[in-house]
Amino acid sequence: MACQGMRGCCLFSFIFICSFIFVVVVQQILYRKNYLPSGQQLNRHHGDETGIWSRVYLPDSFPLRPARNDKREIEWPFNSTSCQMLRKDILDVKVRTMVKTSELFDRWRNIQLCKWEQNKEEANNFTMSVSRSCNASSFLFTTKRNTPSGTNLRFEQGGTLNINPEIFDMFPDDMPYSRSEFKRCAVVGNGGININSTCGKEIDSADFVFRCNIPPLSDEYSVDVGSKTDFVTINPSILRNRFQHLEKWRKSFYEDLEQYKNASIVLHAFYKRFDTAISFRAKYALDDFKSHSSVFFFHPQYLLNVDRFWKLEGVRARRLSTGLMLVNLAMELCEEVHLYGFWSFPTNPTGASITHHYYDNVKAEPGVHAMSDELFHYLQMHARGILHLHTQPCS
């Protein structure tokens, strides 16, 4: 009986040990999936990716990425095993509505552990696709070459405009940019996520800088958004609302644009007929005050091509944002594209509230743009190494 008792105890101990080992193995498998649960991080014991890893348990309130203005103490190589899993975690979300916004934030915070690196093959393939579909090198602006005098130019929203000699004379002879002309470009959105980013120097170090809708660049903001500007857009609504249709405030308009120095000023003159006269008035005003900036008009065919391309990618909106138009353009003109100030949620990735713009909290007209869908594609493009989406402090 004693022997049988001992055998029973041994059997029970053996089953208990096997069960414990099984639970430990399952936990390790779950913990090593390509999504780090809240409050946990991996800690590397050796300097290379093949070193031994252990799990560090942190309080639930501890962010996976350092808080703003803190140093980045952990940054794994882009192609490390861990980073491949974290990137896959983003790419596995095929449609934005597949996961809750909070979970998308978690996955994005996790991928910030990885040092971004361009995937040249992915970036080149995407650029070729965009160039074939949109063709900025030929149709970005209306020019004397692509829009001869006498042309009936079709507006984006329907209807045509006859290009008479006076209008024709406002066009440049040919396109000022060519494909892949610039090495490193910064596309600067106006999102509140720019606040306290300290990205100004990094932005200004880019070879070419795009900005949307003449945002303020005063000393109050330049530490976060920089001041260098090579290309800046103006929506006709800004001319109507901020400058009273340019009927009385032409000088203040000119003076506001002086902060952009020799940047190219780009107008949506041919979105619909209502926008044309005021866009022409803006060019006349800058010419009258002898501005050093060149003024261009988006070619409606280019913007229609961009709209068609992104609809096929899944962005369905009444109108694409100017930010996405510039991202699309940068992919054609630049070898490497970096985005700043692009974040469409009222909280940053760590959950802290942010204003809509870095300079005010005026919301966009609802139902016009699909900003969250656009951002979802930037997250995916970042994970694929096509572009670098910056949502963390730069220093």
Image: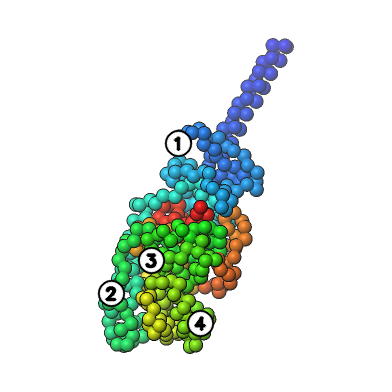
- Label 4 vs label 3, nearer the camera: 4
Q: Mark 1 — residue?
A: 48
- Label 1 vs label 4, nearer the camera: 4
Rendered image: mark on residue 80: none
Residue occupying the point 30% across, 72% down: 175
Compared to 336, does 61 lie above or below?
Answer: above
Percent coordinates x, y for residue 141 in the rendering: 34, 74
- Label 1 vs label 3, nearer the camera: 1
Q: Mark 3 — residue?
A: 329
- Secondary structure under tag 1 reads loop
Q: CA distance from mark 2 to mark 3?
A: 17 Å
Rendered image: mark on residue 174: 2
Compared to 123, does 56 lie above or below?
Answer: above
- Disc 3 crowd rating (10 Å Cα; few below 14, some 14-19, many 20+) is many
Residue occupying the point 59% across, 54% down: 350
| Residue kind at label 1, given as amino acid type | Asp
Compared to 300, does 3 lie above or below?
Answer: above
Q: Which mark sits nearer the N-terminus, 2 or 3?
A: 2
| Residue kind at label 2, given as amino acid type | Asp
Q: Which mark sits nearer the N-terminus, 1 or 3?
A: 1
Q: Which mark sits nearer the N-terminus, 2 or 4?
A: 2
139 or 199: which is nearer to us? Answer: 199
Q: Which mark sits nearer the N-terminus, 1 or 4?
A: 1
Q: Which mark sits nearer the N-terminus, 4 or 3?
A: 4
Q: Are marks 4 and 3 in contact (CB under 8 Å)?
A: no
Q: Mark 4 — residue?
A: 243
Q: Are marks 2 and 3 in contact (CB under 8 Å)?
A: no
Q: Which mark sits nearer the N-terminus, 2 or 1?
A: 1
- Label 2 vs label 4, nearer the camera: 4
Q: CA distance from mark 2 to mark 1?
A: 51 Å
42 or 258: which is nearer to us? Answer: 258
Q: Are marks 2 and 1 in contact (CB under 8 Å)?
A: no
